[in-house]
């Protein structure tokens, strides 16, 4: 391998389709010498971060040459990819897999994504460049999925709109369902609020003072938000924002804090997206 | 032609670096091209110079490198040739003075091109006799300090040509600098064709991109978007880029209650896939030396709403045809122009198509062609100048060449 090739990793372009599938292309590759072609095999190797040794921690996608001379690999939405961050490598034959660098990620079909009706798990894969300049992707796989939309803040409430996906009948599922705020600090009772429902669309309003009531005046509490259907036997749905092209919401979808009264004086309440792009509310001391 | 570029740091990221690579790469397909970087701070350049361009450096500031120059005592002595009034003066030293002078005394090229004022000064003062000397202005004369203008005026007469990125700046150079015999020519920056399909104009997103710096006036854009989203809440705005204004802009978005409609996306590279997600681009700067993002957005098929600020936008946008120019600083005018395009799908599509077509003139092949014409004209002229001293006999053919090269340059 030349010095240049060693220093500059191969780049992969990536195109997303609206169903959640991805197609990767590698342009700068060296065709194997004639005669060795039959033995040649290349693969895109996806390794789940923190789970490389687990049975579902690696996915290999065959790479094949296309008519325009590039190499192509497809990750269809039907391939079940466990949730997490996946580092993307390329491997030729028996060679050690090499990290790929991001080229052009054409994710326009993910922006404002509106998946169609289905009961199979919703596949979301968003490719992104890591801070070290490597190509990775984030994966979610959810059924049901409660997508959070606009959040309107008043002085002491937050009103969230959203849409439910991947249940037989979203309207039936939502009938009688409530939003449930669960405090990560144990032994704090959950808070619930009713939903307004219109087909698959829902909205609810959470009261900050209601959440602030349980704050012990020490470290900030985090409340995770779920939709809980009326039928206790059915699984609840975590509120998350994953139906677009933004791999990490936390720094981009931000909301101003509000100050409300609590049992230990003033409390700052602020909705935010977690590292996993799930919606949560932080209740803590004023800044 | 053998063309040698002299650049501050070819290993970094920035507008001048990118545009120099674009130009060198394209010229390198036909000519012998090298890029000489004063500094080298990392092993590999960020941008790809292509297979034909040679890249070298004069001062190695990689601490782990065996040829590290940072410990040279001259590196901590102030520069004497590089002008004090230049923005990068503090990075230059007696060592850079020496290395640049050595390089320019020996440079084996037909054309030496400087890419910033301080390096143009080196070239004007120190390039050996022979090569044609070209100084590029990537910013504008009017943004330079009095001290720098004075320094440039003293030595730029020794250049053969000064290039600016806009006609407006070329005009300023001609009227303010008194550079007899120096060609002053505007050649725009180049932007390659994006490697992906252009935007189709259906996404309900307005896109802006640039450093979050006061000169970009993103505060105006956010205020204008308050009016846009009041009329059309289904449209939203993404601003790509990082910078010191982030906290201020974030606070403004929150104060106006636009947190569901305006998003600070952070830096993105490459930008083309981000433009392609939008349907309209917005530039609300108070000043643009050129307006690179306008061309980038147009090459992705977006009509651009831009303030008619000095210097670039009016030379890029054909107002009402492939984009809109609005008065600088006018929030209502920005909002109205955005809403015109938001509310009229047909107009937006048509202007996007026109933007795609009209921006092709900034393709590296076209821009390199203009440089090629300029360079060969300059070589012809300098050949004449030399022959006047050497042999009267060649005067007639020399005069013909001069006329010819002037005509060619004008056509370009």
Image: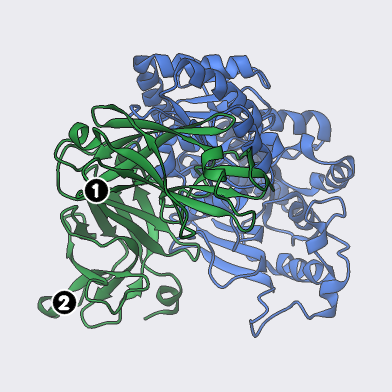
Compared with residue B93, is residue B370 higher up or lower down, i.e. above or below?
above
Q: Is residue B196 visible?
A: no
Picture residue at 86% right of the left edge, 64% below the top: B79
> Does residue B137 appear left or right of residue B19 in this picture?
right
Which residue is labeled 2 in the image? Answer: A40
Q: Quadrant of residue B71?
A: bottom right
**Mark 1, other Cα within 10 Å: few <14 / some 14–19 / many ≥20:** many
Q: Which residue occupies 43% across, 70% down?
A: A8
Which circle's residue, 1 or 2, is located before the other in the chain?
Answer: 1
Chain B colour as displayed: blue
Q: Which secondary structure lies at badge 1?
A: loop
Displayed quadrant of residue B356: top left
Residue B120, percent from left and from top: 74, 52
> Viewer-proximal residue, B328 or A231?
A231
* Residue corresponding to mark 1: A20
Task: Examine the rendered structure and indicate whether residue B103 appears above or below residue B174.
Answer: below
Measured in 3D between alpha carbons, the distance from the residue under mark 1 to the one under mark 2, in whole angstroms, is 30 Å
Q: Nearer the viewer, residue B59 or B224?
A: B224
Any idea which chain is the green one in this picture? A
State which chain disc 1 sits on: A
Question: Residue A141 location in percent, x, y?
Answer: 26, 54
- Which SS class for mark 2? loop
């Amino acid at each position: 391998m030349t010095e240049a090739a060693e220093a500059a990793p191969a780049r992969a372009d990536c195109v997303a389709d609206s169903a959640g599938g991805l197609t990767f292309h590698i342009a700068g590759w060296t065709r194997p010498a004639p005669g060795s072609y039959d033995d040649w095999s290349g693969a895109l190797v996806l390794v789940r971060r923190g789970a490389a040794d687990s049975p579902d921690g690696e996915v290999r996608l065959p790479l094949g040459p296309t008519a325009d001379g590039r190499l192509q690999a497809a990750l269809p939405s039907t391939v079940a990819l466990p949730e997490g961050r996946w580092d993307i490598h390329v491997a030729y034959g028996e060679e050690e897999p090499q990290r790929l660098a991001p080229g052009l990620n054409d994710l326009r079909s993910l922006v404002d994504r509106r998946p169609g009706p289905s009961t199979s798990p919703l596949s979301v894969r968003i490719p992104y460049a890591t801070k070290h300049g490597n190509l990775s992707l984030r994966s979610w796989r959810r059924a049901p999925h409660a997508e959070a939309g606009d959040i309107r803040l008043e002085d002491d409430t937050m009103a969230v709109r959203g849409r439910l996906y991947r249940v037989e009948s979203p309207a039936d599922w939502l009938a009688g369902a409530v939003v449930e705020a669960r405090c990560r600090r144990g032994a704090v009772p959950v808070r619930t609020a009713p939903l307004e429902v219109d087909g698959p669309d829902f909205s609810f309003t959470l009261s900050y003072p209601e959440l602030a009531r349980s704050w012990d005046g020490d470290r900030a509490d985090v409340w995770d938000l779920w939709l809980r259907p009326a039928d206790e036997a059915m699984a609840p749905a975590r509120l998350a924002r994953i139906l677009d092209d933004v791999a990490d919401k936390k720094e981009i979808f931000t909301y101003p804090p509000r100050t409300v009264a609590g049992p230990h004086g003033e409390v700052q309440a602020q909705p935010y997206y977690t590292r996993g792009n799930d919606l949560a509310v932080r209740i803590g001391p004023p800044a | 032609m053998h063309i040698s570029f002299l650049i501050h740091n070819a290993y970094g990221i920035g507008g001048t670096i990118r545009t120099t690579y674009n130009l060198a790469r394209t010229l390198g397909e036909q000519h012998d091209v090298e890029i000489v970087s004063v500094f080298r701070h990392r092993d590999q350049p960020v941008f790809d110079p292509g297979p034909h361009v040679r890249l070298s450096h004069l001062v190695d500031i990689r601490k782990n490198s065996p040829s590290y120059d940072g410990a040279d005592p001259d590196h901590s002595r102030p520069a004497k040739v590089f002008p004090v009034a230049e923005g990068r003066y503090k990075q230059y030293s007696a060592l850079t003075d020496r290395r640049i002078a050595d390089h320019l005394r020996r440079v084996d090229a037909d054309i030496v091109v400087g890419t910033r004022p301080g390096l143009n000064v080196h070239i004007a003062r120190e390039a050996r006799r022979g090569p044609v000397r070209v100084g590029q202005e990537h910013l504008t004369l009017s943004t330079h300090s009095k001290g720098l203008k004075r320094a440039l005026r003293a030595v730029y007469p020794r250049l053969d040509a000064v290039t600016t990125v806009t006609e407006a700046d070329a005009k300023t150079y001609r009227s303010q600098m008194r550079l007899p015999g120096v060609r002053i020519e505007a050649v725009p920056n180049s932007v390659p064709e994006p490697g992906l399909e252009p935007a189709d104009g259906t996404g309900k997103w307005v896109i802006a991109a640039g450093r979050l710096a006061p000169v970009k006036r993103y505060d105006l854009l956010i205020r204008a978007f308050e009016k846009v989203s009041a009329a059309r809440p289904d449209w939203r705005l993404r601003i790509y880029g990082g910078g010191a204004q982030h906290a201020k802009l974030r606070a403004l978005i929150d104060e106006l209650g636009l947190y569901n409609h305006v998003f600070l996306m952070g830096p993105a590279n490459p930008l083309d896939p981000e433009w392609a997600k939008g349907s309209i681009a917005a530039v609300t700067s108070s000043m643009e030396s050129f307006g690179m993002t306008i061309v980038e957005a147009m090459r992705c098929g977006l009509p651009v709403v831009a303030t008619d600020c000095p210097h670039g936008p009016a030379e890029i946008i054909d107002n009402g045809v492939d984009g809109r120019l609005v008065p600088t600083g006018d929030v209502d005018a920005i909002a109205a122009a955005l809403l015109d395009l938001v509310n009229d799908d047909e107009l937006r599509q048509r202007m996007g198509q026109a933007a795609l077509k009209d921006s092709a003139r900034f393709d590296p092949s076209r821009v390199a062609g203009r440089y090629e014409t300029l360079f060969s004209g300059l070589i012809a002229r300098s050949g004449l100048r030399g022959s006047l001293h050497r042999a009267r006999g060649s005067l007639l053919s020399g005069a013909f060449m001069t006329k010819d090269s002037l005509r060619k340059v004008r056509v370009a």
